[in-house]
Amino acid sequence: MKFIYITSIDEWMYPNIMKILKQFLKDVFLICDLRNEKDKFLSYLNKADATLIDHVTLNQPLFIKLYKYWLESPTIKVFIDDSEHPFLFDIIKNENLDIYFKRESLKLEYMFRLQHFIRALFSKYENKYFHFKWLSIEETIKVRKELTNKILPLPLTFYPMTKIKDREKIYSVSFISRLSPPSIIRVLGNYSSFSSRSKLAKIVSKIPRSFVYLSYSGAKNIYHYQISQFSQAILSVQQAILYLLIIICKYFHLQKLL
Amino acid sequence: MQILSSSKASIAPVGNGYDTYRYWEIPLCGAALIAQNQYTIIPNNFENKKNALFFSSLKELKDILEYYFLEGNDEELLRIAENGRRHLLQYHTPQHRANYVIENIKRRI
């Protein structure tokens, strides 16, 4: 039994992938690095019982032709959505796909629907104002429903680049995070995380010997608690606008999506 | 990483997505994981008060922090942190993920 992992992952990450898969490499696993082995790709396909492609690879238009060969190949075809991209690409809805490993499989149906509703708004907005076009949310929902029996949860994990040392516990509780600045342009994309993170920072900072560190896009590595308080006020207005939008859309236009 | 290793507990917030690297980084660094309730399916996830602490509202977070840090129960966190690290190494390393993928593919062949 042979598996092939097809990837074009960043060069600096490649050694780590090799280390992780080392125990499988001898017997069952081959890695095809598309950046360097594009020519070998087809011969690899003929040798495999199953092939895995990751999202990183699929995201590169240069390799789209190769994916088409892949989808027509007789192997078991597996896709790994490692970066929780909100939208699926056309290639994923191909009926030949056998397994879809998904980073975030939601437990609750209403959360799933709410997520898609927010993303419906977001995708329409992005498609209007940005040059790239996502797969429409209607198609995305359709794809995910069709794929339901093929989706398996695959949460993240963490691979430390340096050895982690045991240290004296000098802090009680720490909270280290990045704030995306609230803005009218991106309100649908980041309002929620900004709001919750600045509130969390406020609570944690009241605990003795706590450590709070919020970096801020555009002004890296700066403790921006004061800024976040100010921005919180701006955000409240944006949230009100967003909720109003959701109510209007729900009853007039986008209800059919749900 | 140094800060996480030097903390008795650390908070992993959800972002624009639910699953974050920080969620897995904290237990590995030996701090007790304090996270928002997970809405995603995580096979062999951490368990509340056994090897992590979960909250669903800011009030619950406040209660957790007060109980452990203002009422003097922070030593309990060391046990939770240790259990968390052990659980992570038992079920959630990159090698476990690779094995999980391979085993599921084998079942389909």
Image: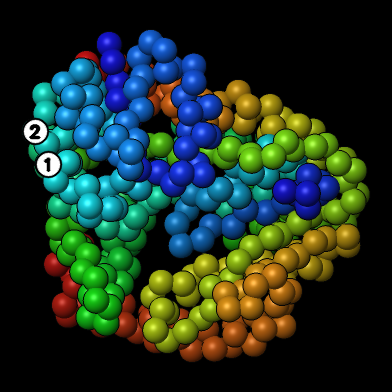
**Residue A51, visible in the rendered structure:** yes
Q: Position of residue B25 (x, y in %)?
A: 64, 44
Q: How many marks?
A: 2
Image coords of residue A36 (percent x, y):
33, 38
Q: Amino acid at mark 2?
A: Glu
Q: Position of residue A181 (x, y in %)?
A: 54, 78
Specify the label residue B49 is tagged with.
none
Residue B46: image x %, image y %? 59, 35
Q: Is residue A1 above or below residue A92?
A: above
The crowd level at tag 2 (other Cα within 10 Å; few <14, some 14-19, many 20+) is: few
Query: Is residue A54 at all visible to an observer of this figure?
Result: no
Q: In which image quadrant can residue B56 be found? A: bottom right
Q: Which quarter of the figure has residue A140?
A: bottom left
Left or right, residue A96 beside residue A175: left
Q: CA distance from mark 1 to mark 2?
A: 6 Å
Please state if A198 lies on the left or on the right of A211 as rendered: left
The residue at 67%/83% (across/down) is: A227
> Circle 2 sits in a helix, a strand or a loop, which is it?
helix
Parent chain of label 2: A
Q: Is residue A134 above or below residue A17?
A: below
Q: Residue at x 63, y 39 (%)?
A: A160
Foreground pick, B20 / A252: B20
- For the C terminus of chain A, give its image quadrant: bottom left
Q: Residue at x 11, y 24 (%)?
A: A74
Mark 1–mark 2 contact, CB under 8 Å? Answer: yes
Q: Pointer 1: what residue?
A: A68
Q: Which mark is residue A72?
A: 2
Q: Quadrant of the N terminus of chain A?
A: top left
- Callouts 1 and 2 in the same chain: yes
